[in-house]
Amino acid sequence: MRAIVAPDRESGAEGLALTDRPHPHAAENDVVVRVRAAGFTPGELDWPGTWTDRAGRDRTPSVPGHELAGVVTDLGYGTTGLTVGQRVFGLADWTRDGTLAEYVAVEARNLAPLPADLDYPVAAALPISGLTAWQALFDHGRLATGQTVLIHGAAGGVGSLAVQLAREAGAYVIGTGRARDRSRVLSLGAQEFLDLESERLEDAGEADLVFDVLGGSILERSAALVRAGGTLVTIAQPPTVRPRDGRAVFFVVEPDRGRLSDLAARVRDGRLEVTVGEVLPLEEAAGAFLPGKRVPGKTIIRVTED
Ligand SMILES: NC(=O)c1ccc[n+]([C@@H]2O[C@H](COP(=O)([O-])OP(=O)(O)OC[C@H]3O[C@@H](n4cnc5c(N)ncnc54)[C@H](OP(=O)(O)O)[C@@H]3O)[C@@H](O)[C@H]2O)c1
């Protein structure tokens, strides 16, 4: 099968190449999926799991990409809940070959059925951003109706979905970002927008939950904005600071079949808008990891057509 292969950590994005790879095997509780559309994270070549298996053993060369939408072609021994020929979407395992390949072996529990009226590229753009936004707001942040949430990077992949989900849950939403993001963030449902390039973060006031996706000095300055008893949730890096009277939580997104189905239902009925950016063929996937012109939205690779 054709796949994008990263030969070793040192070569970085420049080393990525479209190559032939063996067809994956469906291990116990796995499915093999013919990948129609895939998502990746440009920074994933720096993640430890890209280069090692669950036991920490070297697994180079590696196939990147952790989001997929496609069709099940094979079931491993003991796999339940999905069938051959079913449309699915979800997350690939962090420590196995990924989704920039014509076929991928994935634990079945990472995937949810894909409704017939959701396009493959939209479905491939949803798993990481959607599950991360949900888990940050509700599982870790315990956001409740009537509370105030401040969401950094509110026009980005995770932030834009967090704004919509928080607003739907009846929270008061303050989004932050660059000046050019203001109208987009307000149109997604935020009641206020703070331009981090020209306004003082400290003027945002207090929030029950601050959700940081940026890290660095923004994260450090965010702890002071958390109201007593509130929470700072961060995903870019573990917290370097804590709220004086509150919790600080760093987490890595986890697969969740039921939640994926809930998110898909929201996309179908228009409550949730996912912004797909460029949709590129597999031949152009390696180039998409390199810094270049910026197209808003999540870049999706259309891996196979049939
Ligand atoms: N721990 C986890 O499980 C997990 C899960 C998902 C994502 N992540 C991480 O979370 C981060 C965000 O992911 P994402 O997909 O949402 O990224 P993204 O789509 O690039 O969104 C980030 C947003 O923040 C804006 N931004 C960046 N720096 C800024 C600054 N200094 N001032 C104002 N705005 C700024 C960006 O604007 P520009 O595009 O204009 O720069 C963009 O709108 C990434 O580091 C990602 O790896 C972690």
Image (cartoon, rainbow, N blue to C red):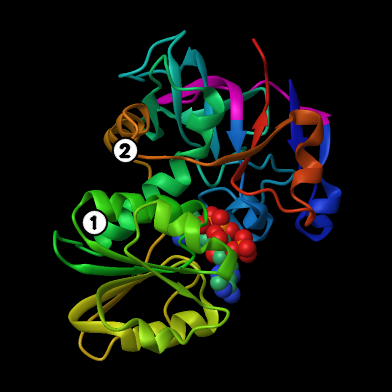
- On the image, numbered disc 1 is attached to which residue? 138
Mark 2 residue CB less than 8 A from any atom of ligand 1: no
| Part of the protein shown in magenta | 19-37
- On the image, numbered disc 2 is attached to which residue? 271
Instruction: Say which residue appears at 30% left-offset and 29% top-offset.
Output: 265
Residue 242 shows in the view: no
Of the numbered discs 1 and 2, the one sitting upstream in the chain is: 1
Is 228 above or below relative to 131? below
Instruction: Say which residue appears at 36% left-offset and 27% top-offset.
Output: 268
Neighbor class of circle 2 (other Cα within 10 Å; few <14, some 14-19, many 20+) is few
Instruction: Say which residue appears at 28% left-offset and 55% top-offset.
Output: 166
Instruction: Say which residue appears at 31% left-offset and 28% top-offset.
Output: 269
Residue 27, horizontal then vertical, whole percent: 48, 25
Observer-nearest residue: 250 or 127?
Answer: 127
Is 172 above or below relative to 121? below
Dot 2 amino acid type: Arg
Q: For marks 1 and 2, give the CA distance.
A: 17 Å
| Helix, strand or loop status at disc 1 | helix
Q: Is residue 208 left or right of residue 213?
A: left
Residue 29, horizontal then vertical, whole percent: 39, 26
Residue 96, horizontal then vertical, whole percent: 57, 40
Tell me, yes or no, whether the two marked residues, 1 and 2, touch with CB atoms within 8 Å: no
Dot 1 amino acid type: Phe
Taking the image in four quarters, ligand 1 sits in the one at: bottom right
